[in-house]
Image: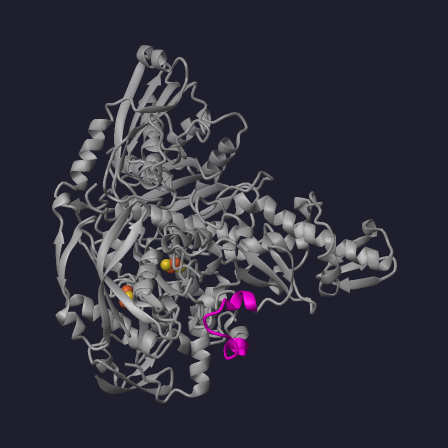
Amino acid sequence: MAEYKLSINGENLTVEVEPATPLLWVIRDTLGMPGTKFGCGMAQCGACTVHLDGTAIRSCTFPVSAAVGKKITTIEGISEDNSHPVQRAWIELQVPQCGYCQSGQIMSAVALLSKNQKPSDEDIDLAMQGNLCRCGTYPRVRKAIHLAAKMMTHEIN
Amino acid sequence: MKSTKGVSRRTFLKRSSATGIFLALGFPAAALEAVAEKMPPLQNMALEALKGIEINPFIIIDQSGKITIISHKPDMGQGTWQSIPTVVAEELDVDPATITIKSSVGEKKFGDQLAAGSSSIRGSWNTLRNSGAAAREMLMTAAARQWGVPVAECSTANARVLHTSTGKSLGYGELIEAASTLPVPAEPKLKAATAFKWVGKSVPKPDVPLKVNGSAVYGMDMKVPGMLYASVERCPTITGKLVSFDDSKARAVKGVKHVIKSERPFFSRTFEGVAVIADSYYGALEGRKRLMIEWNTSAEKEVDSAAFIASLHELAGQEGAVHDQAPEFKQVLEQAAKKHMASYETPFLAHSPLEPENALVHVRDGECEIWAPVQGPDGAVRAVSEYLGIPYDKVIIHVPFLGGGFGRKAFTDYILEAAYLSRELKAPIKVVWTREDDTLQGPFRSASVSRMEGALDKEGNVLALHHKIVAPSIQGQLWNGLKENTPDAWAMEGISKHDSPYQIPNYKTSFVLAETSIPIAWWRSVYASASMFGHESFIDELAQMNGKDPLELRIEMSQGDSRYRKVLEALKEKSGWAAKPEAGKGKGCAIARSFGSIVAHALFMGRNKEGKLRVEKVVSVIDCGTFVNPDTIRAQTEGNIVMGLTAAIKDPIIFKEGKVQQTNFHNYRMLRINEMPEVEVHIMQNNEHPGGVGEPGLPPVAPALANAVFSATGKRIRKLPINLDEV
Ligand code: FES
Ligand code: FES
């Protein structure tokens, strides 16, 4: 057991956990923020995607000790009122089915758009292929990323 | 292991309510927050919070005018959370956007609450409409009496009863008390379809906003005070028995509280395991890794999927149980000018909902409370009540959103496992399966073989068709319900004469029973997910024998001005079928009627940079009769194409010496976004009774693909999965 100071969604939090504990379980169980999901536990599905200093990582295989001193963002930190363009695009195109993969999809999409304002289909394939959706929302994920890109560059509101 | 230092009390409470400590489903986080502190945490808050008057099981109205509508079929992504309340609201004449939605919790008054068989809307359509219409009539009668006017002069709008000539109006909330004492009309007047305001429109789903900010609550997110987490080490072979275990290392892991033998009843069988129970899930997982267990797997050396599939091909030589046979069938086949026979093979598959199975159960003195993602709340309550010997009404279930189901969560073994542990340990226990547990343990879609026989006359007209399916019986294995020499009724879905799009004068369907100890279950679209591969591939083979265009042959064989023909003609037009594919590319089509709806796909293949065949585009036409939400129908059809393609080109489940060889998504792979073709879905408009939507799009995917591969390469593939890199 060790104490870790984490910065999550702009809040400074202290947790006392085993050093090897994957960040996923610290976020979900220790801190009670369940928006980040568990789907595979081996960096294969993307349901657990969060940002570490703006980069998408799979929190299920990322030890908490390595997250110290970095800015962690979870789905809860994107916006609670669904005002982020990616969330608006997701609602506009009614992307989620069961919704279980969607926190991870959105985190990957936000990370992509923060680095690439106008992603091509190939850029989307590359950035999003770590996020599985068993329900099959891929066509809408793709369209929603293009729509969010337009919203972010104010081509449309 | 837990610390909330640095988290303000306000933030903590807010998070707690959003995490589902107080049973969030049915209640937006904000509404919950207001009551969270006041609620006894282990009570059925959902019911407590409803202080209104129940005018019938589906509708509760309180005096302030707040309307709550119950959705009695769990939402696993198929949209019942929107579609069911919308049908009731339509007849009640209230805007669905203004109502509160609550899930049923297994109450007997709702009858069957199992979301399966694409039946939620088509099976409840009349009930839902009648309940809305009856309540509206009672509210109008109450108003008419109060005003002393004939009911016929009253109308409704915006949750109010109106009397236009006097300008009087009363809100539903003001009328509910009087209305609820009136007799319930047996045959209330229903709206004409042309008067629908919300049914038939693409209304945004109320769960979507919750699913884009992490606030939607799943079983995986449930927590109650005092809860412990369990992870269960299961025998790597299906029915191996526990001989002994050494838990000394597991118990040394920080946070591990108990290690005990566990059991998981699944119909007539009980699977054994060793459960590690800890104060965190991570602790339970770590403890589980350190268990040393001796299993007896001797009974299973023989369980091998390749050998099983080989035995299916052998069994295909038997006559089996005939489901349906035209009187002249045999004779016509014998005397036909041209004959063709072919066998098709499909593998075992796992469901792999992205949310692994999980259940939180608290067994207390003579009662039990459950929080679990399950497709049938009433079935789960019944199973737990029987298992624990606790009366039905002393078992309470809370069903959150399901992170996918696909048939897996229609079963309750994972809930019984948690119930067993909670009873033994006298604490609320949450069992969370790993992806490996989910992939290795099943139940699975069974492997099967279809043997097809066809006869043509000299002109190439199809005179006779026989579909023989060789497979284990789900009915038989699970419910011991297969009568001798009878086909499994579910195996006839899609292939029966009743479902066939074609006017073939001599039709025959039959079923050869295969036995297996591998646990099998419904898997999205059940047998049709496999049998239509053979059925519709064979139709293409007949077209080829005839030198006919496969879609033209289907149109020709479909009946007169039937719904089938309209679907096929729409497909021809919408997909631009007539255009000839460029060299090396291909197109294929297939049609199937299953679960009350007809779906046809046209699938187009091209080549990637390496010259490998890839699916570029799928155009679908669906006729599901009257529908509630066209956008949901498109979404479900897109989803069926993805799941159908995964089943057709990705990994199968393979058994060797009783053990599944696939474990997680790296070796049981799924279609990913970079492999996603463009999809176009067209919905037929008519006034037929609603058909299913969650499954019918899946069965025609695999044959459309195999037919397109044939068109591109001239190779006829009769075995799934297809390796697109090698064809
Ligand atoms: S749970 Fe982390 S990638 Fe699947
Ligand atoms: S929406 Fe269900 S897994 Fe993606």
In this orientation, which residue lies closer to the viewer: B57 or B137? B57
What colouring method underlies this structural image? one colour
In this orientation, which residue lies closer to the viewer: B544 or B475? B475
Residue B112 in percent (x, y) is at 50, 48
Residue A120 in percent (x, y) is at 35, 63
Left or right for B396, reference A71: right
Note whether residue B661 is visible: yes
Left or right for B268, reference B148: left
Report which quarter residue B226 is drawn in: bottom left
Left or right for B666, reference A33: left
The residue that appears at 39% across and 48% down in the rendered structure is: B640
Note whether residue B664 is visible: no
In this orientation, which residue lies closer to the viewer: B277 or B499? B277
The total of numbered circles placed on residues is 0
Ligand 1 sits in which quadrant?
A: bottom left
* Residue range highlighted in magenta: B33-48
The residue that appears at 21% across and 83% down in the rendered structure is: A1
The residue that appears at 28% across and 54% down in the rendered structure is: B264
Residue B583 in percent (x, y) is at 28, 39
Check the image and report above or below for B309 versus B438.
above
In this orientation, which residue lies closer to the viewer: A46 or B216? B216
The verdict on residue B473 being magenta is no
Check the image and report above or below for B98 versus B184.
below
The verdict on residue B36 being magenta is yes
Left or right for B160, reference A126: right
Residue B519 in percent (x, y) is at 27, 45
